[in-house]
Each structure stands twice: as C-alpha cells, then as structure tokens.
Image (spheres, grey):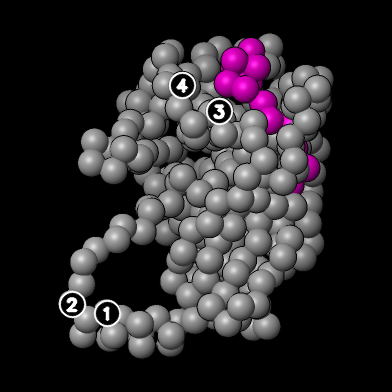
Amino acid sequence: MATKQQKDRSKRKSKRRLKKKEAKRRDHWESAETADRHDLYERSVQNSESEIDFVLEVWEARRGRIPTLLREDFCGTAQTSAEWIRRGSDNRAIGVDLDAEVVQWGQNRNAERLTDEQLGRLQVRLEDVLEVDPGPADTILAMNFSYFLFKDRESLRDYFVAARRGLVDDGMFFLDAYGGSESFTELEEERDLDGFTYVWDQHSYNPVTGGVVNKIHFRFPDDTEMTDAFIYDWRLWTLPEIQELLLEAGFSRVTVYWEGTDEETEEGDGVFVPTTVGEACAGWIAYIVAEK
Ligand SMILES: C[S@@+](CC[C@H](N)C(=O)[O-])C[C@H]1O[C@@H](n2cnc3c(N)ncnc32)[C@H](O)[C@@H]1O
C-alpha cells in the first residue's frame, strides 16, 4: 500500500525555512484523540486520481472509446467513485460495500466533495460483491487488494465470475496486487505524511496457507497512536494464480501492468506498462486488466 504514494524526499533547507516549515507542520499536527480513521485512510492509502488516470489510459489504448459507467467494488468511502464522477459530466459510478459504517461515512464525505448534480450520478449499494446485480458496467475496479479476502481458488473464481457477469460485452475489470520478497516477511514500514505517520504492519505470514494478517496503524506527533485502525485477514495471492483464475472465470484476455523504476530514486515511477516479465524486487505493486 505504501508504494503507491509519492515518497517524501529529503531536501536541504536553510534553518529559517525549516523553522517556518516546522511551525506550519505543527498547525497540521493531528492526534489519535481527534483524527478520523477513514479520513487518514483516504489520505495515506488511496490514490484515486492515478487509478482513474490508469483506467482511462488503458481504455483508450485497448478500446478506443470512453467508458462512462464505473463500478467500484469494495468501495469503502467511495473516494474513487467520486473521482470518476468528477472526471466527466456523463460519468456515473456505482460503489459496492457491505459495511454500513464506512458507507455512511463516505456518503457524508461525498456530500461535501461533490455537487448535488454529481451526487445524483453516484449510487452506493450496501451489498456483497458476490451478489450485487446493478446491471452491466463498462468497467469494474477492485483496488487495494480487497479481493485478497477470498482465501481459496473456488471463492476467488466465484468473485471473478460475478465481476465478469457485471460487465458490458467489451467491459474491462481492473485489479491491483502486491508482492515481492518482502511481502513474505513480517515487518513494519512507516511513512511520514502531513500531520501523522502511516504504519503498514505486515503482522503475520503463514507459508503453509499463504495467509497474511496486515494492519494499518497511525502515529501522531503528540505520541498518541491509533493502533489497528484497519486489519486485513487475507491470502497473499501471486500474479500467476490471479491470472489463471481470471481466465478460468471466462475473461478472454488478462494483462499484467508492471511499474517502471525512477532512475534517481530507484523507486516506482508510477508508470505501468503491459508485460509478461517482472522484476524480482523486494516490493512491487502491479495492475491487472481482465477483458470480458
Ligand atoms: C481494503 S478496503 C478497500 C477500500 C477502497 N476500495 C480502497 O481502494 O482503498 C476493503 C473494503 O471491502 C469491504 N468488503 C469486504 N468484503 C466485502 C464483500 N464481500 N462485498 C462488498 N464489500 C466488501 C469492506 O467493508 C471494506 O470497506
């Protein structure tokens, strides 16, 4: 999750500028007492703009037409649906999530970040992705590894079959996946953001089942911590397994998009290209596109 975000780069600054910056930073400082976990999640984990950029690029390259109806599975706060709605006046989005608490939070947030007209183009359904049937969408998204909650081949294939059924004839299904040698280890990774620190805790990994428990904590400059803000009990699926199951579910073509490397920072450069050969690096995030 961490690698999707722009990493803070250290810059040399004069003492005076640093002082100014620190004062400003203190204004932004947050505390576990007052912060909201969904707000922190949106700001630290998600990158809806680049996700939608990617979806549009692939649609242009693969289909030469502009999709309008997007379904966001496991939508949580529906931040990505809101971004989709803002991108075009014909765009409509359907978010699907079965957790009433996060859906309500998202409805409140979306009422602030969207106009009434835009809100009219967003539908959020409090339903299970395996059962929802809102009619065919141009494109379906399952991001931030949410589908890793299906822990055996049969249930993951069932979800992929349901997603395929939910698409128009030339529809495309977008997923992401993470991996690399470090993903099989137990570790904690911190990232300093504006007013708080995001902590990605790969809490446990079971090599026998592929089961992982990952947690997100948030730490604050006043030494408070929001521990276990989110806990994910997943199976760490590999790219070949995911591709095979998508094909078994009936998708006609499945493509993995691999992220390039920034030569200076040696980190991901945010540019994803289709490939059949990845890099054996410590940590990676890839997109997968499945065509109906
Ligand atoms: C990791 S969050 C993903 C949030 C957001 N889509 C993102 O990209 O960051 C997973 C979400 O999936 C929802 N969820 C879990 N199982 C689900 C199911 N079977 N059907 C619909 N939503 C589900 C949870 O309530 C949670 O909000």
Q: Label 4 vs label 3: CA separation?
A: 8 Å
| Label 1 CB less than 8 angstroms from ligand 1 | no
Whether tag 4 and tag 3 are in contact, CB under 8 A, the answer is yes
39 w.r.t. 98: above or below? below
Q: In the rendering, at what x and y percent does residue 231 appear?
A: 74, 52
Residue named by callout 2: 14
Which residue is labeled 3 in the image? 181
Q: Which of marks 4 and 3 is nearer the N terminus?
A: 3
Q: Which residue position is annotated with label 4?
A: 280
Residue that carries the numbered disc 1 in the rendered image:
18
Between the residue at mark 3 and the residue at mark 2, the CA separation in whole angstroms equals 39 Å
The answer to which of marks 4 and 1 sits earlier in the sequence is 1
Residue occupying the point 29% across, 85% down: 19
In the image, which is nearer the foreground, mark 4 or mark 2? 2
Residue drawn at x 79%, y 62% is 100
Question: Is disc 4 surrounded by few (<14), some (14 to 19) or many (20+) residues within 10 Å?
Answer: few
Check disc 1 and give the amino acid type: Leu
Q: Where is residue 270 in the image (x, y as percent from the top left)?
A: 35, 40
